[in-house]
Image (cartoon, helix red, strand yellow):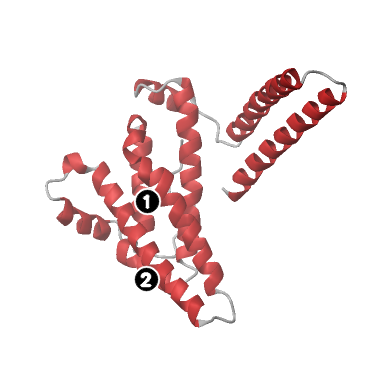
Amino acid sequence: MKQLNTRLNLVYALILFIIMTIFLFMVGFEINILVSFLLSIGLGMLLLNIMGKNFQGDSDSKLPRLSKEKEAFYLSKGLSKEDIGYFRRTMAQAHKQIIAIDKNMHQSGKLKAIENRNNTVALSKELFKNITQEPNRLHDVDKFLYVHLPSLADLSEKYVEIEGHKAKSKTTYDILQKSADTIDKMSQQIAEDYVRFKQEDIEDMSVELESAKRSFHKENTDTDTNSFDNTI
């Protein structure tokens, strides 16, 4: 995720540099400033379009091969070929984030207790599976995919990093406690995301929320983090 953002920032910085260079080059040859500006912007937009397509192609090439059966399934759910590509990229990123959360939660006693209490990883995996079965409902889980998962992955990673510092001040311990409280709330939100997705089958949301946490409780906390089905 960080590598993806870094690559995007480098692309934008390079294009901005090229635009400025072209503009200054044209002005140096005494071409009208307005004309130079418009031509520079036009060439920059063209480069952005070309590099953006290459970047997306790069991203798609890292996805697992799409089988004919899976493609037919997506089409039967009303997804266009463009929708399918977007869905698969989104779910591939979600899969990485769930794996990261699982890893982070087991590197800290405090986080492991939070995970056990909320059963965050098991519920995330189950919701992931449910989304792949109903890809046409991607809009129903926007907060789960675009807010809760990435936020929890990032914050839990930072928590583990800070907790690993050999020397800690009172301020550090305060930050860790606040971060743990936030991670706990995010874990609860993920449980709510799961229940909300299944709300058609639920009569009492509050009762089902606790039931969901218990029903997916892992018997073995050392289960391989890559073992859940990530077929997209």
The local crowd at label 1, few if under 14, some if 14 to 19, many if 20 or more residues have their Cα within 10 Å, is many
Numbered disc total = 2
Report which residue position mark 2 lands on: 113
Provide the secondary structure element on which disc 1 rests: helix
Q: Residue at x 55, y 80 (%)?
A: 168
**Of residues 165 and 32, which is closer to you in this image?**
32
Q: Position of residue 41 (x, y in %)?
A: 68, 24
Q: Position of residue 119 (x, y in %)?
A: 33, 60
Provide the secondary structure element on which disc 2 rests: helix
> Hey, which residue is sitting farthest right in the picture?
29
Q: Quadrant of residue 207?
A: bottom left
Q: Position of residue 147 (x, y in %)?
A: 41, 48
Residue type of the residue flagged with mark 1: Ser
Using the image, tell me which numbered label, if any, was put on residue 124: 1
**Sequence-first disc among 1 and 2:** 2
Task: Measure the alpha-carbon separation of dots 1 and 2.
Answer: 17 Å
Question: Relative to residue 177, is residue 89 drawn left or right?
Answer: right
Question: Relative to residue 49, is residue 95 drawn left or right?
Answer: left
State whether residue 227 appears in this view: no
Asked if 25 appears above or below 225 in the picture, the reply is: above
**Of residues 193 and 46, which is closer to you in this image?**
46
Residue type of the residue flagged with mark 2: Ala
Question: Relative to residue 94, is residue 117 drawn left or right?
Answer: left
Question: Relative to residue 141, is residue 214 drawn left or right?
Answer: left
Q: Residue at x 50, y 67 (%)?
A: 159
Q: Position of residue 186 (x, y in %)?
A: 36, 57
State whether residue 15 appears in this view: yes
Asked if 100 appears above or below 93 in the picture, the reply is: below
Q: Residue at x 18, y 39 (%)?
A: 200
